[in-house]
Image (cartoon, helix red, strand yellow):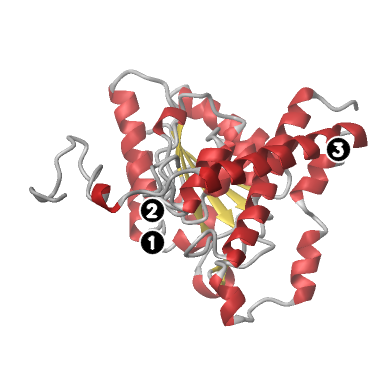
Amino acid sequence: MAPTESDSALYQAMRLIRVFEERALDLVATGEIVGGIHPYIGEEAVAVGVCAALRADDVIASTHRGHGHVLAKGADPARMMAELFGRTTGLNRGRGGSMHAADVSKGILGANAIVGANAAIIAGAAWAARQSGRDQVAVSFFGDGALNQGVLLEALNLAALWRLPVLFVCENNGYATTMPTRDGVAGTAVGRAAAFGIPAAVVDGMDVAEVRAAAATAVARAAAGGGPTFLECLTYRFECHHTVERALRVDYRTEAEIASWRTRDPLVIQGNRLDAARRDDIDAEIDTIITDAVEFARSSPRPHPVDALDHLYASGLRPRAGVS
């Protein structure tokens, strides 16, 4: 079967995330990005597959490992890079950083460093959309480490009870930080959804086409008033949980395990659906985009201390008077 433009777009979106994350890892190592990141390398098919099934006005909320979701939903990679650099041209003026990037204009309600916390935010967004008569769909991304968090279970309950247009996406990469999922999760991810009467499916999270197909069905159901769906996407992060692992030399996975998962690299799977020339063109284009993004971030101004208390309140009110 000949590759389609959609095949190219899916590969392009995943390649953007992959190269962005690879460059970010290099910039953490050189100290230009301070504080480290949670790399998304290996999991790109989940963010891209789900976001490819959404409309522009649908909304998402992400996790501490959120760069992939933010980029897949359409955020400007240059402004995302500037956010990691802590520059005023960043998505959030450098105040959100790696774990709290947001772009409401793109339907990105924000990454969230609190495990599982965005599920309640998304349930609220879905309820608000329905109350306003809009057929928006809201997506909550979370990892297997969130499966035991009460806030996620509360959100599942409300979404089912009120038939909210929510897609719950569990990115099961096998580990909650360093703990294997099997050692920390009783029962199954989809079993939790089933307990609330929410349709659930296990999806190959390394194949963007399968993720998109499952997400498209769930999104259509939600938009039509059918209520929430739960997808467990089986995936794997090729890199560390957080870049601090490189200094701590944490040892909890075997090289054989990592190598085995790398044989199912989602970029290779999707790239093989394109001809080599088209793939090379996309790779070159993405390299240029990310190089330009890094230069944009480097040349952007740093925030001034005098503005440190700005933007804490939507009204513009500063928390203390007389600060200069």
Q: Position of residue 194 (x, y in %)?
A: 48, 49
* Mark toward the start of the polypeptide (3 vs 1): 1
- Mark 1 sits on what residue? 149
Q: Position of residue 59 (x, y in %)?
A: 44, 33
Dot 3 and dot 2 residues touching (CB under 8 Å)? no
Dot 1 surroundings within 10 Å: few (below 14), some, or many (20 or more)? Answer: few
- How far apart are the two marked residues, 3 and 1, measured between alpha carbons? 43 Å
- Mark 3 sits on what residue? 280
Residue at image position (16%, 49%) is 324
In this rendering, would 228 be left or right of 273? Answer: left
Q: Which mark is residue 19?
A: none
The answer to whether 319 is drawn above or below residue 109 in the figure is below
In this rendering, would 137 be left or right of 289? Answer: left
Q: Kindly report which numbered mark, 3 or 1, lies closer to the viewer in this rendering.
A: 3
Amino acid tagged 2: Leu
* Mark toward the start of the polypeptide (3 vs 2): 2
Q: Where on the picture, by quarter, is residue 261?
A: bottom right
Q: Secondary structure at mark 2?
A: helix
In this rendering, would 313 be left or right of 256? Answer: left
Q: Position of residue 80 (x, y in %)?
A: 52, 43
Q: Which mark is residue 152?
A: 2
